[in-house]
Image: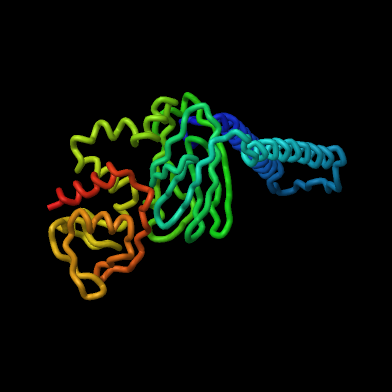
Amino acid sequence: MLPVNQGSDFASEVDFIYMTLFWGSVVFFVGIVGAAAYFSWRYRYKAGRSTPHQTHNTTLEIVWTVIPTLIIVVIFFWGVNGYMKFAVPPGEALEVQVVGKQWLWTFEYPDGTRSVNELHVPVNKNIRFVMSSEDVLHDFYVPDMRIKRDIIPGRYTQIWFRANEKGLGEHVTTCAEYCGKGHSDMHAKLFVDTSADYDKWMATGGTEWEDYKTHMEDWGKIQWDRKGCSTCHSVDGSASKGPTWKGIWGTMVKLTDGKSVLVDEAYLRESMMLPQAKIVAGFDPIMPTFQGLLRENEINGLVAYIKALK
């Protein structure tokens, strides 16, 4: 019923109020439906039996008015207290800029480091997300952290959380608001790191890069999936919103201006950084720029992966 992992300090509080409301609803449902079923049976029609006329019962009316009112007031102030905790981030929180676009997430850190569909945060530190959209309505949702907030075009929204020791590791981030054809593929990975791992990732791209740097095509395949390339570029020759990568390396592709260009390292790098410079014939200019969003090792990995797709 609920995500098992309670990765943030908010999670246990959110789960507690949710389960309280759930089981409270179950109790009232069983009580009301049970009473209705009993009275329906107890006072069912029988020939020759007349039911006495009832006007009102003052005690009963007071009870069913006062008790629900008190319960609703308690729930209201309980909810307001939790909402205020979510809505007001601490002043010393680490600020991360989050941008939602069809159909990927980009993240920017205070030192200018950027990433696509991959978010790293240190454990036991307050994190504040300042969020915006480049196109349509999105919704930033991390189930394990119990954080969820709409991202509205033309304005900034924010949310914050603090990952605890239980949250160390990988978590799924998704868009919870239908935003077009690629909505179901709009995922990112959130990694809660120790302080040492977080510092290493900020400097080099993390420990995973160390594991793959001798197999660049495998590293590139990971980036194809993480950076959202898979939503537009197939690797099996099938049609998609962008040119397939299968067998494209070393070929001449025709552009919308009638010219042709060789698919080599220079062309691929330019297509990532300045995607509108050369548009392949038959495709719309919809690819966003990855300028500042890809590390050098990630670019090299993507090129190596494309080379390997014969």
Q: Residue furthest bottom?
A: 258
- The quarter of the picture where residue 217 lies is top left
**Residue 282, relative to residue 151: is it above or below?**
below
In this rendered view, identify the residue nearer to me: 248 or 15: 248
**Residue 231, relative to residue 252: is it above or below?**
above
- The quarter of the picture where residue 16 lies is top right
> Can you see residue 30?
no
Q: Position of residue 247 (x, y in %)?
A: 14, 57
Identify the residue shown where x is 84% and y is 46%.
54
Identify the residue shown where x is 20% and y is 53%.
265
Please give left or right for residue 62 compared with residue 5 in the image: right
Q: Position of residue 97 (x, y in %)?
A: 50, 46
Please give left or right for residue 43 compared with residue 211 in the image: right
Colour scheme shown: rainbow
**Number of numbered discs present?**
0
Identify the residue shown where x is 58% and y is 46%.
158
Q: Position of residue 93 (x, y in %)?
A: 57, 35
- The quarter of the picture where residue 94 lies is top right
**Residue 35, relative to residue 245: is it above or below?**
above
> Can you see residue 50?
yes
Please give left or right for residue 52 compared with residue 159 in the image: right
In this rendered view, identify the residue nearer to me: 245 or 107: 107
Q: Position of residue 239 (x, y in %)?
A: 23, 63
